[in-house]
Image (cartoon, helix red, strand yellow):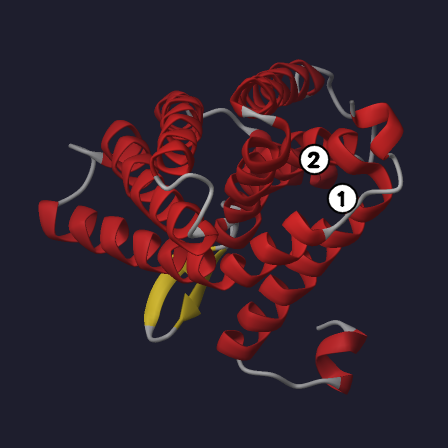
Amino acid sequence: MSLLSIAFPLSSEMLWIVFALIQFCMFIITYRFFGKTGLFVWIAFSTIVANIQVVKTVELFGVAATLGNITYGTIFLASDVLNEKYGKQQAKQGVVVGFLALIVMTLIMQYALLFPPNEGGSDMQEALQLIFGLQWRIAVGSLAAFFISQRIDVWMYHLMKVKTKGRYLWLRSSVSTMVCQLIDTFIFCSIAFLGEMPASIWWQIFWTTYLLKFLVAAMATPFMYWARSIKPRSVPSDN
């Protein structure tokens, strides 16, 4: 048990909400100080961290869930900010950055696991194996879901921006993310788990995962407005 949990005893639901607010605020700070470059870094960082967090399961709102949904949701926020302020091509580039970051992390950690641990290091080897040990269906599902859903999100956001003539930021940000999170969840759950478990369990995992992502997308909307209003310190290098 950590000292933080002792000093601030919160329920899992409150921890989850605070966790979301902290990450959204950190996203805003990153963009404020590093501009477009910060958005690319955030996408790469969050893609890797979300795929590490997902191995931990918790109970939220009475259902079993995995962590990583908040961090993963901030990737859609970052790509939407890129789309809104720098154009569709920059948003597409952000998707490629995140996709490559996930591939590189996966390959490097698989190679790192090949090294035999020295005497006394077996516990750490087992821990790393547990976290980074490759399960091919999960790895392929994660990569496919990320790339496809993010590309659709970029296209949908841009289309809605053109159709609304730049109005209704909340609409295009929320709708594009919520729809594409549904696509993302379906692709990942289908590749990773379909056929591996009873259909009733599969549907439960699918809907509970998506509902949490839906909540994250709704919480992200005010931060999208905040990000749009920011003039980053690195604006000269963003052009």
Quarter occupied by the C terminus: top right
- Tell me the SS state at disc 1: helix
Count residues near mark 1 (Cα–Cα under 10 Å), then give few for <14, some for 14-19, many for 20+: many
* Residue 65 image-quadrant placement: bottom left
Side (left or right) of 202 relative to 33: left
Q: Which mark is residue 39?
A: 2
Q: Which mark is residue 31?
A: 1
Can you name the residue that lies furthest to the front here? 165
Q: Position of residue 109 (x, y in %)?
A: 66, 22
136 relative to 220, above or below: above
Amino acid, disc 1:
Tyr
Q: Position of residue 14 (x, y in %)?
A: 55, 78
Q: Nearer the viewer, residue 228 or 144?
A: 228
Q: Position of residue 186 (x, y in %)?
A: 25, 37
CA separation in Å, label 2 and label 1: 6 Å
Q: Is residue 160 visible?
A: yes
Q: Residue at x 60, y 16 (%)?
A: 100
Count residues near mark 2 (Cα–Cα under 10 Å), then give few for <14, some for 14-19, many for 20+: many
140 relative to 51, above or below: above
Q: Earlier in the sequence, mark 2 or mark 1?
A: 1
Q: Residue at x 56, y 37 (%)?
A: 84
Q: Which mark is residue 17?
A: none
Q: Nearer the viewer, residue 103 or 35?
A: 35
Side (left or right) of 54 relative to 104: left
